[in-house]
Amino acid sequence: MKNNIYDVIIFGGGAAGLFCAFTAGQRGLSVLVLDSSNKVGKKILMSGGGRCNFTNLDIQPENYLSANPHFCKSALKGYNQWQFIEMVEQHKIAYHERKHGELFCDESAKDILKMLTDECAKAKVVIHTKSAIKTVSVLDSGYSIKTSQGDFESKSLVIATGGLSIPTMGATGFGYEIAEQFGLSLLPRTAGLVPFTFSDKLKQICERLSGLAVDVAMSVNATSFRENLLFTHRGISGPAALQLSNYWQPGQTIAVNLLPDMDACDLLLGYKNNSAKSLLRNLLSQQLSKSLVLELQNLYWQDYAEKPMAEIPDAMLVDVASHLSDWQLKPSGTEGYRTAEVTLCGVNTDHLSSKTMECKTQPGLFFVGEVMDVTGHLGGYNFQWAWASGYAAGQSV
């Protein structure tokens, strides 16, 4: 590198950008990372409650959403979770497995960020923070970039600017603007892995139940997740709701099975046979939180609230059971990008090589990570996509 000329310039110092940077640097290339924030890796630091859910033991293409479901396969195969785990172990980072194969740091997400920046330093990657990019133009030899910290040139340009989620972390739509500048189409972006909100009486119910977590099966459009649902002051969150938000469209109703391990109808009719003198709410409180049962009682069997089971008609119990196993909730919306963990859709992958992440129509231009139309489930899948896509581009720039 001389006179601000590099082999590779990367926009964005997040997970995908840093991984791509040292991967390219390890090949002997000169690499510059430009990031608009005051420090790199901010979203890494806040991820997983500060512990960073850095990958998952079971990574499958089915864990990703994209208009082209096959696009992610090559990169995920080219750099898998076991390779990342090996790097984590080489750096002596202690970690543990939680449910569903999710891997978290024992200590702090800072360990993962330090690993990435240490690898960048070892590979002689140059990192400039607080760097606002003004213009990008094409040269015969590559790209010319004008920034608030001076002008640079490179043979290859990698866009690793992420999506629109959590703007307080510095998220912007800059990567999409670059894509459009070079004639790439974008798929409509929405907030993903995001809590649902309600505006009707359900909002008041959620407020009263705020903080309560329930093991449920939640579904929409024939897609179902068995996870915890968490009631909040504004609606519902927790893993079940976040997962389902990737599949929900405004106006749709979601179904919640509050008793996923049992047949609600058999349960209630069994109560009537075996506990004829008891109240339904007292019996149901053996399975569900008392506060939730009282809310359900107000909704579905208020007229029989003080009647013993023997006096509740079978048809009424069947009706109540249908609400317990198929509670229909219609969100008014989501909390949006403010709290979303990811951005759904983005740069259309039809424009990109699935093996290298390079733009098919613009040589030397690459896209990695969240900016493109690949979105993982909750549970370390989006980080694995960052590592895998960053590696694919880093090997090819």
Image (spheres, rainbow, N blue to C red):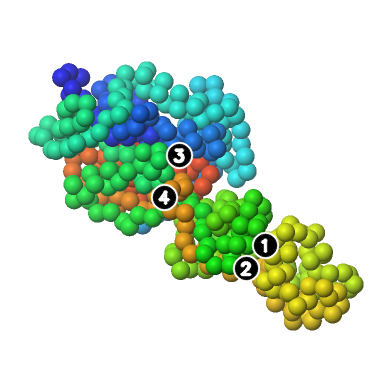
Of 25 and 321, the residue lying toward us: 321
Residue at left offset 21%, top offset 30%: 148
Callout 4 touching callout 1 (CB < 8 Å): no
Which of discs 1 and 3 lies nearer the camera? The answer is 1
The spot of residue 332 in percent (x, y) is: 48, 64
Amino acid on which the number 1 mark rests in the picture: Leu
Side of 142 relative to 86 (left or right): left
Q: Quadrant of residue 149?
A: top left
Q: CA distance from mark 4 to mark 1?
A: 28 Å
Question: Residue at label 3?
Answer: 383
Q: Residues within 10 Å of mark 1 (few under 14, many from 20)?
A: many
- Which residue is drawn at the image coordinates 90% and 72% (left, top)? 277
The kind of residue on which mark 4 rests is Tyr
How many marks the image carries: the answer is 4
Q: Earlier in the sequence, mark 1 or mark 3?
A: 1
Name the residue at 61% across, 59% down.
206
In the image, which disc is placed on residue 258?
1
Distance Cα–Cα, label 4 vs label 3? 18 Å
Please tell me how crowded label 3 is: few (under 14), some (14-19), or many (20+) other residues with Cα within 10 Å: many
Question: What SS does tag 1 mark?
Answer: loop
Quarter occupied by the C terminus = top left
Relative height, residue 1 to residue 336 (above, below): above
Residue at the spot of label 4: 337
Position in image of residue 10 (x %, y %): 28, 32
Cβ atoms under marks 4 and 3 closer than 8 Å: no
Precedes in sequence: disc 4 or disc 1: 1
N-terminal label among 1 and 2 = 1
| Residue under numbered circle 2 | 327
Give the mark nearest the N terminus, 4 or 3. 4
CB-based contact (under 8 Å), mark 1 and mark 2: yes
Left or right, 89 with reference to 346 = right
Q: CA distance from mark 1 to mark 3?
A: 31 Å
